[in-house]
Amino acid sequence: MGKMWMRKNRKLSSSQIILLGFLGVIAVGTMLLMLPWSRAGAGSAPFLDALFTATSAVCVTGLITNDTATYWSVFGQTVILCLIQIGGLGVITIAIFITRLSGRKIGLMQRSTMQEAIAAPQMGGIVRMTGFILKMVAVIELLGAVAFLPVMIPEFGVGKGIWYAAFHSISSFCNAGFDLMGVKEQYSSLTSYTGNVLVNVVVMLLIIVGGIGFLTWDDIKRNRLHLRRYRMQSKVVLSVTLVLLLLPAVYFYVNEFSSPAWEDMSTLEKVLAALFQSVTTRTAGYNTVDLTLLTESGQMIMVILMLIGGSPGSTAGGMKVTTFAVLFATAIAVFKRRPNAHIFGRRIPNDTAHYAATVLILYLSLFLAGGIFIGSVEHIPIIQALFEAASAIGTVGITLGITPNLCTASKLVLIILMFLGRVGGMTIVYAALARKHPYVSEFPQEKIMVG
């Protein structure tokens, strides 16, 4: 029986291993959160609430049906934090780390799976990269926690302050968006820190660093300020990320926070709020202002940013900034009647453009289907439903406040969207439709007019 299982296991593709890994962690997390001591109150958490929370944590989303600080005990919060850490680093990265600690040899299949999990361009050096990732994560999260201490300890005391600092550092870096500020006001996120420069800056830096991707870290470590030596992917990630952070921030400041609805805020608070809302929509999940007060135009801009997301091989979700860049470059190539797209003096293969277009269609289809379903079932404005769907598929976690009141069907839709958004829609497709042999024949070609 054991040999038969091993033979079957060897037939699993990298996509199937990643898929099963995430499902396994979600299942374990759900069972742990259903234990009586995971809940702060009496009794055990219902299965759907435990499943929703475990999925949101592993998929580093941040959507919640119950306030994290008041509904879950310290044990339950610790389980959530462990799930966030595993989900942020990736199940395969953790598995490779455990394998290395045990002294076992890491085979070709594990290396191939790790390569796909962190979106590495090649398999060589993948084990070294795993060690580098884990060391950097430990250092960054520790520095983030230390930076939070001057705010958390005076406010919550030494013990609780250290716990809160560590929790929010890990949650911010992993782009999860879970918070413990419900002790002030349930579901309040970071709205009590709108004008706190330290909290805003530290959270934003952790989100950005976690969202630019592990390969970009490697480039920064190797090449420092010699930007010309960077991989094209790192150049794309850094440049597009900068544009997608600054332009929306300018919009939020000029068109949103300058309106009468925000007249009680100081200029500093408006600047911080504009920057923070631009950063957090890149799959982080925190908010420092009441998002329901934004105009529908502002909410739709947040939807677009949530769908784009962060970088491949990072703690962020979404379609990824590289997908957006490839699609944009491909459109320019079509306008100029070029056979291939070009970015930073490099030619983009056509199959990459095809992949990017497929990812776009897949995400848009899931986003629209989920949003329309939630809107029709809940009888709420479509902008609220689309916002929630985008937050789930982009693994963001910000909400207009409707998540706790959704019906079972809508919560199940969000669970599916969160899972697909974190694992990757294409990973699901490849896992379900993996072929043992490539196509050896082609159909006759015929043109079709488009546009």
Image (cartoon, rainbow, N blue to C red):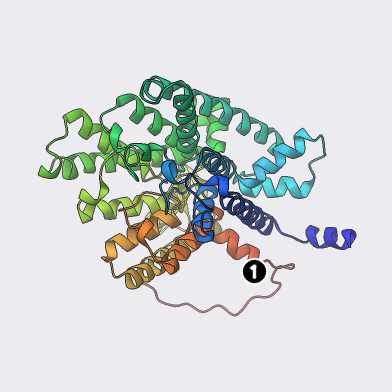
Q: Residue furthest left?
A: 260
**Quadrant holding the N terminus:** bottom right
Seen from the viewer's position, the closer of residues 246 and 1 is 1
User: Which quadrant does the C terminus fall into?
Assistant: bottom left
Q: Position of residue 169 (x, y in %)?
A: 47, 31
Q: Residue at x 44, y 67 (%)?
A: 408
Decide which of 211, 346 is in the foreground and name it.
211
Q: Is residue 394 above or below residue 268?
A: below
Name the residue that disc number 1 marks.
433
Residue found 24% across the figure and 51% down from its top? 292
x and y percent of residue 280 in the render?
37, 42
Q: Residue at x 64, y 75 (%)?
A: 442
Q: Quadrant of residue 444?
A: bottom right
Element assignment for label 1: loop
Q: Is residue 437 above or below residue 242?
A: below
**Residue 193 in which image quadrant:** top left
Q: Residue furthest front?
A: 42
Q: Look at label 1 and name its amino acid.
A: Leu
